[in-house]
Image: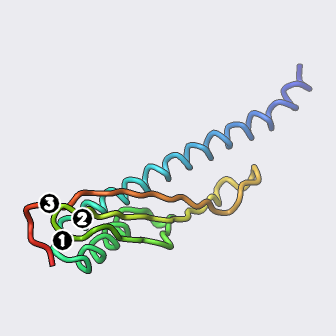
Amino acid sequence: MAVEIVILTPVLFAFTLLVVLFGKYVGLRGDVDAAARDAAREASLQTSAAAGQAAARQTVAASLDGGTTCQQVLVGGTWGPGGEVVVTLRCRTSLAGLGLIGVPGSVSVEGESAVPLDPYRSYE
């Protein structure tokens, strides 16, 4: 009985860390998608494409935690009445706390969101 416990304990520990890794990845995907959604919504409230890009970048910076950095914050779409704003993010986060099971040091996640622009509003 003692031999089985000695053999199974590291396996169960590694499985627990793997579950934590997947949970962290799913949480990160949710955070990046939420940041893209919030950035697209904030950009859609602006009256010009330049102001929309600046607002989207500020929203992404405020939305994500310190361990997650976005290399790309692309703001595009058709700017004008009836158009849409599309925000695409490519972010990386550190997995340093899970080094015991041999995962890479960081993981990359992408998120995208599109918001329609008001057809009755004037845009620059």
Q: Residue shown at 30%/59% (left/top)?
A: 38
Between 103 and 79, the one nearer to me in the picture: 79
Element carrying mark 2 = helix
Q: Residues within 10 Å of mark 1 (few under 14, many from 20)?
A: some
Residue receiving disc 3:
118
Q: Amino acid at mark 2?
A: Glu
Q: Secondary structure at mark 1?
A: loop
Location of the N terminus (image quadrant)? top right
Label 3 and label 1: CA atoms lie apart by: 11 Å
Residue 41 placement, left or right of 75: left
Q: Is residue 9 left or right of residue 1?
A: left
Contact between marks 1 and 2 (CB within 8 A): the answer is yes
Task: Write the residue at 67% across / 43% down.
Answer: 17
Task: Name the residue furthest right.
Answer: 3
| Label 3, residues with CA under 10 Å away: few <14, some 14-19, many ≥20 | some
In this rendering, position of residue 40 left or right of residue 106: left
Q: Position of residue 30 (x, y in %)?
A: 44, 49
Mark 3 or 1 closer to N-term?
A: 1
- Along the line of sight, which residue is nearer the eye, 87 or 31? 87
- Residue 99 rendering spot, x and y as whole percentages: 72, 56
Place of residue 55 in the rendered image (x, y in percent of width and height, measured from the top left):
27, 73
| Vertical comparison of 53 with 35: above or below | below
Which residue lies under the disc numbered 2? 42
Q: Amino acid at mark 1?
A: Gln
Quarter containing the C terminus: bottom left
Instruction: Note whether 6 is above or below 71 in the view shown.
Output: above
Dot 3 falls on a residue whose secondary structure is loop
Residue under label 1: 46
